[in-house]
Amino acid sequence: MSTKKILLVDDSCTARLVNRMIFSQKSNYVLISAMDGKEAVERAKREKPDLILMDIVMPRMTGLEACRVLKKDKETEKIPVILLTTRGEEQYVQEGYASGCSDYLTKPVNDTELLDLLKAYLGE
Amino acid sequence: MTGTGNGSRPPTKVGCPTEPADGNALIPTGMEELRVRVQQLSLREQIERNHFLLMRLNAANARLIQSLEQGDVFEGIAEIIANLLGSEEIAVFDYHPVEKTFSLAWSSGVEAEALQPFLCGAGMFGRAVQQGLSQFQERQQDGALLPYEKNLTACVILKSSREIVGVIAIFGLLPQKNNLEWADYELLKFLETYGAVAMKFQRLQGRQVST
């Protein structure tokens, strides 16, 4: 049984809900959530998740900014960050990887693709 | 590989392991197993697809209910379409049945000026209201779109108890999304009814507050 912890970061409750449903039905991950980049950084430092799944366009702090902050911090730099966003344009993808993310997925999310990717990162 | 050895094996009946004509029962049995496996895979795929659809509908439903509490039905609809369908260019029109006119209620990602022609209710947009049926660009006949509708992906009729409440116009899809898929049509069917109920609820609530 997996007890890996995932931090879901999205200002859209629809997105958070869909992701929660995908994970709760098909995995045993422990899920915690944040509604913007700033809250994500705080929760990541406090709770040390095994992986962060984060949107880009969010209030207060974007996913790109949050990713940069997390990667500069020794406490959180090793946590894989997967960006999951509606922004599929090449420019955003490049910016995403430049911010230090481990992977970049676009919405609408494909549940199988998402779970396979997470399993690859979490070693299960 | 096993075989008869003479190169003249009679045609094998697929799915009929009871007739191993040449004593080579392994081949038909293997094929039968393969057929069953393919069927199982297809069944599993169907289950997965339907499960995925139910999750999306459940999430959409939860967001609509939340939007009633928060009074942000239009934002809720836009969020559902952006996250679950894949478009960030949306306009919602109110329909006034007595005057048979439209008014723009809310939009996101589309210039208000570009939406002006839609208020006359012609083209695919007009057909949707006249017929009371949602229209989709990929199902339109050639030449059935007006020039300003080129980027119009879908007109979703919001209908509650046969009464047209409004229209959701969905314009461009996200770059990673090429076209609407089967689950998108199901989601839009959901919005036709439940989006209408939510919009009507919001309207009535507004009236209650103003009286």
Image (spheres, coloured by chain):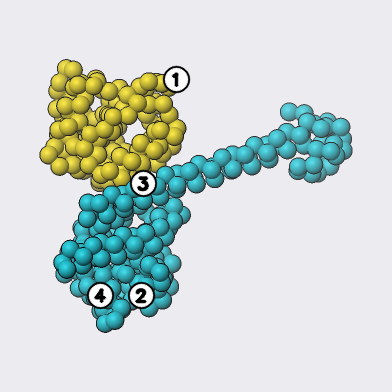
Chain colours: A yellow, B cyan
- Outermost residue toward the bottom in this view: B99
Tell me where residue B68 appears, x and y as whole percent. Answer: 27, 54
User: Which residue does the image show at 86% across and 32% down from the upper left?
Assistant: B23
- Which amino acid, mark 2? Val
Query: Which residue was labeled with disc 3?
Result: B59
Task: Give the foreground label among 2 and 3.
Answer: 3
Query: Which residue was labeled with disc 2?
Result: B129
User: Which residue does the image show at 39% across and 62% down from the upper left?
Assistant: B193
Query: Which residue was labeled with disc 1?
Result: A1
Q: Are marks 2 and 4 on the same chain?
A: yes
- Outermost residue toward the top in this view: A74
Tell me where residue B86 appears, x and y as whole percent. Answer: 32, 51
Q: Is residue A88 visible?
A: no
- Which amino acid, mark 1? Met
- The answer to which of marks 2 and 3 sits earlier in the sequence is 3
Distance CA(mark 3)–CA(mark 4): 29 Å
Relative height, residue A46 to residue A109 (above, below): above
- The answer to which of marks 2 and 4 sits earlier in the sequence is 4
Cβ atoms under marks 2 and 4 closer than 8 Å: yes
Chain of the residue on which disc 3 is drawn: B
Distance CA(mark 2)–CA(mark 3): 28 Å
Cβ atoms under marks 2 and 3 closer than 8 Å: no
Cβ atoms under marks 2 and 1 closer than 8 Å: no
Q: Secondary structure at mark 3?
A: helix
Q: Quadrant of the N terminus of chain A?
A: top left
